[in-house]
Amino acid sequence: MSIHPTAIVEEGARIADDVVIGPMCQVGANVVLGAGVVLHSHVVITGNTVIGSQSVVHPFAVLGGPPQHLQYRGEATQLQIGADVIIREHVTMNLGTEAGGGVTRIGDRGFFMAGAHVAHDCQVGNDVIFANSATLGGHVVVGERAFLGGLSAIHQFCRIGDYAFVGGCAAVAGDIIPYASAFGNHARLGGLNIIGMKRSNIARATIHQLRGAYRLLFEGEGAFVDRLEMARETYGDCAEVGRILAFIDAGATRSLMTAGR
């Protein structure tokens, strides 16, 4: 363990033997730091916050601060951050609220660039990338391998599907299906996240089926409910299409984002 003499580590914090804590860091009494965690200088970690093994936090990040919610009264809610997460400068991640389930959760291997924000009660999957200043409102769900462009803003209670791409400066006010791309202010679907799927080694034949399902769902004619059933009948055997259909079937607080201007 390496703790700089200018760092403040409160009694009660649970810290693995090989953690590195740099100058001017503050670690609260209810914090848990896993094996190999590195805190560069001026990091603040407070509240009931757990950070998984091998995660790295850069200067001026504040993790586990109270939720930006007027009804929060200091309840013992949590922030849970997974393993191998990279958190760059000025990133903020807040505790949950009792009304929202009590836990803000970040998956493994995420990359959060400078200024990104994860609000209370968000549930963020594995292998995500948040570019500079990407922002989540409260209660947002972000699927695995999603990419949020710089300065994008996600409205509270929205869902971002697995492998989805959100363009820079996009204002997202509706749910984005898995594998889709969304752009603009307010954002609309602009097709599939083909680059992201190729980077994830999704087979060409699978991408072809996803394209067919997307066109049927969002570019076809007739009532959406009828197109949904047609997509289920035509492409339901494809697991990736099934993920989109399950996302739609699950419903949510926000409306489903559609294509077009």
Image (cartoon, rainbow, N blue to C red):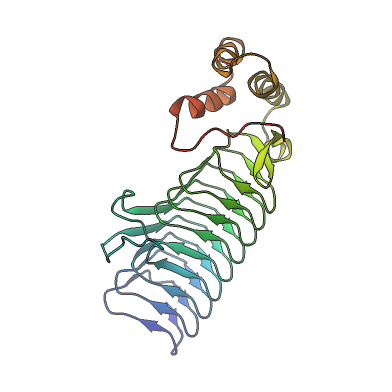
Residue 72 coordinates in the image, percent (x, y): 31, 62
Above or below, 177 relative to 141 = above
Q: Residue at x 42, y 62 (%)?
A: 94
Name the quadrant of the C terminus: top right
> Viewer-proximal residue, 167 or 1?
167
Q: In the shown orientation, is residue 229 left or right of residue 168?
A: left
Residue 119 coordinates in the image, percent (x, y): 46, 57
Q: Residue at x 54, y 53 (%)?
A: 109
Above or below, 221 relative to 152 = above
Residue 200 seen: no
> Viewer-proximal residue, 170 or 210?
170
Q: Residue at x 31, y 73 (%)?
A: 13
Q: In the shown orientation, is residue 103 left or right of residue 250?
A: left
> Viewer-proximal residue, 16 or 223?
223
Above or below, 226 relative to 66 = above
Q: Residue furthest bottom?
A: 5
Number of marks present in the image shown: 0
Residue 242 coordinates in the image, percent (x, y): 54, 22
Residue 257 seen: yes
Residue 132 coordinates in the image, percent (x, y): 64, 61
Q: Residue at x 70, y 26 (%)?
A: 207
Residue 198 occupies which quadrant of the picture?
A: top right
Name the quadrant of the N terminus: bottom left
